[in-house]
Image: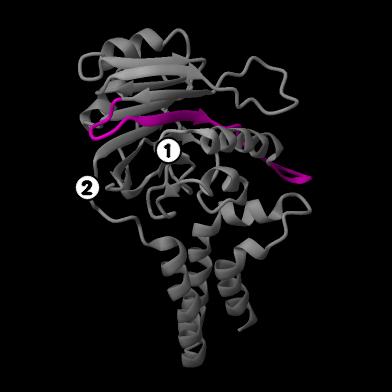
Amino acid sequence: MWVIVIVAALLVGHRLVPDRPGHLGSLVEAFLPWAGLAVVGLFELAVWRRNVRRMIAALVPAVVWLGVVAFPAGAGTGDLLVVQHNVSDENADPAGTARALAEARPDLIGLEEVTPEQVGVYERELGGAYPFHAVYGTVGLWSRYRIIESAEIDIKPHGLEADWRRGLRALVATPGADSAVFVAHLPSVRAGLRGFNTEWRDDSARKLGKFITDEATQRVVLIGDLNASVDDRGLRPVISHMHAAPAGYAWSFPARMPIARIDQVMVRGGDVASIRTLAATGSDHRPVAAAIRFDRV
């Protein structure tokens, strides 16, 4: 019975799990959706033992799990359809990947891990339907609507010596009002003997959050591989200023058997009406498509 209590308590109170040692809190939150396996196991054990009292008790964490992580964002429509995809710098078929993304007919496409050798491929394949684009470093934005201005943003974490350019900001003439669109790729995290190493990602998230906080445009769209689920406390500097879809079923990584959604679409001045994954491409991530609905003023 105590196992049931612990699972339910983790689902409800995961924010109370301390982040030290080893960033334990971030580790728990990264795999929060998979607490459902424990729920199923508890219920099956109760059925096998024919223990009605335990079967009923196991329904408690099941209901909590459904409420916290299981229900996907609705299938609503919005003002903008946005696709986010880490295309992978090892993608052997960038042309096919570009065509697959265009088939979803989004208004904006944010890409990460766009190598210099492959930029021309994406420009050629997406240029017809998306005549406006901006690429800085390894991140890019393709748009149906005019890009008024664009610039690179520095979200490189402290202590990282490598050439690292993974952020951009563009002002896009979206219908109704201009939108500031950010495309970002935060550092990956590593699990090791000392725990969950998130320092670079968390530092990069703080810098990205500062750019969003300082943004004067009312409408803000964030597209990116953030290497974190929306429940991960490492994203607080970002998500505290934005609306994001709940964890849902739109899991994006790894592509063959997704266990979490680390590819995100967020908005300020509106909400994410729906979110879903698209078919796998030549990347180790799956694309994510989100419908954004802006506030009416």
Secondary structure under tag 2 reads loop
Amino acid at dot 2: Thr
- 253 versus 183 height, above or below: below
Magenta region: 173-197
Amino acid at dot 1: Ala
- 11 versus 130 height, above or below: below
Say which mark, if any, is on residue 228: none
- 124 versus 161 height, above or below: above
Give the residue drawn at x 25%, y 19%. 130
| Eye-nearest disc, 2 or 1 | 2
Give the residue drawn at x 42%, y 33%. 217
Confirm whether the magenta stretch covers residue 190. yes
The residue tagged 1 is 255
| CA distance for labels 2 and 1 | 25 Å
Residue 35, x across and y down, in percent? 53, 63
Q: Residues within 10 Å of mark 2 (few under 14, many from 20)?
A: some
The image quarter containing residue 190 is: top right
- 83 versus 61 height, above or below: above
Give the residue drawn at x 58%, y 45%. 235
Earlier in the chain: of badge 2 and badge 1, it is 2
Q: Can residue 257 be seen in the rendering of this structure? A: yes
Q: Left of 103 or right of it: where is 283?
A: right
The image quarter containing residue 150 is: top left
Residue 155, x across and y down, in percent? 60, 27
Q: Can residue 285 be seen in the rendering of this structure? A: no
The residue tagged 2 is 77
